[in-house]
Amino acid sequence: MPFDYTLDFHTVDFRQHPELYRVGRGEQGVLLVQPYKGEILPHWRFKDAAAATESSEVIYGLFEAYLKAHDFVGADMARKFIQMGFTRARRYANHRGGKKYAGPVPDDKKGQSGAHGRAELPRTDHPDEDKVEAAAIFKRKWDQAKVHPEYLQQKEAFIQKYGK
């Protein structure tokens, strides 16, 4: 099932209502789903390799803690933040200032990722090497998270119970 952007994310507590959560694709909902956004976002940093190392380790620790608590939604959100560390660091490496697309996000697409019909801006000829390394650090943690046996087991159980 696709990620449901019609929910009132200001009032829904997904820890209390995991049945409303949808895994979706990629990073969908990463900056919307509470209380996890509030728990994970303060630790999310990718400005350089040192920040990415500390951030990815802390968030991976949260990922493991959520798994231990059998809180799949929290684990999946931590996985999404780790994935987003990779994608954002790569974006800033490739596009000075981090702006990937020309023009504003359409009002009806705010909070959703994607080009939404906008053209991609030109990439820099000289990627920021510190951001490239920050991305690689997050990528290694993301690769660990997405194949973690307990994560895979809880994901399958969640999908069986609630749908994707």
Image (cartoon, rainbow, N blue to C red):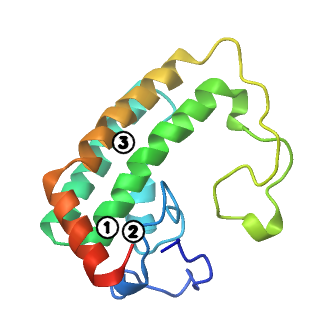
Q: Quadrant of residue 161?
A: bottom left
Can residue 24 be seen at all in this image of the molecule? yes
Instruction: Give 132 or 118, whichever is nearer the viewer.
Output: 118
Q: Which residue is mark 1?
A: 74
Give residue 73's position: percent from left, percent from top: 33, 71
Q: Is residue 65 left or right of residue 86?
A: left
Q: Amino acid at mark 1?
A: Gly
Q: Is residue 71 above or below residue 45?
A: below
Residue 133 shown left or right of residue 7 in the figure: left
Number of marks in picture: 3
Q: Nearer the viewer, mark 1 or mark 2?
A: 1
Mark sitting on residue 55: 3
Residue 93: assigned label: none
Q: Which mark is residue 36?
A: 2
Q: Answer with mark 3 or mark 2, whichever residue precedes in sequence.
A: 2
The residue drawn where x is 52% and y is 71% is 2
Q: Residue at x 64, y 62 (%)?
A: 112
SS assignment at label 1:
helix
> From mark 3 to mark 2, how far is it between C-alphas?
15 Å
Quadrant holding the C terminus = bottom left
Q: Position of residue 105 (x, y in %)?
A: 79, 56
- Residue drawn at (71%, 18%) of the image: 124
- Evaluate if marks 1 and 2 touch, with contact meaning CB atoms under 8 Å apart: yes
- Of the two numbered discs 3 and 1 in the rendering, the one whose residue sits closer to the viewer: 1
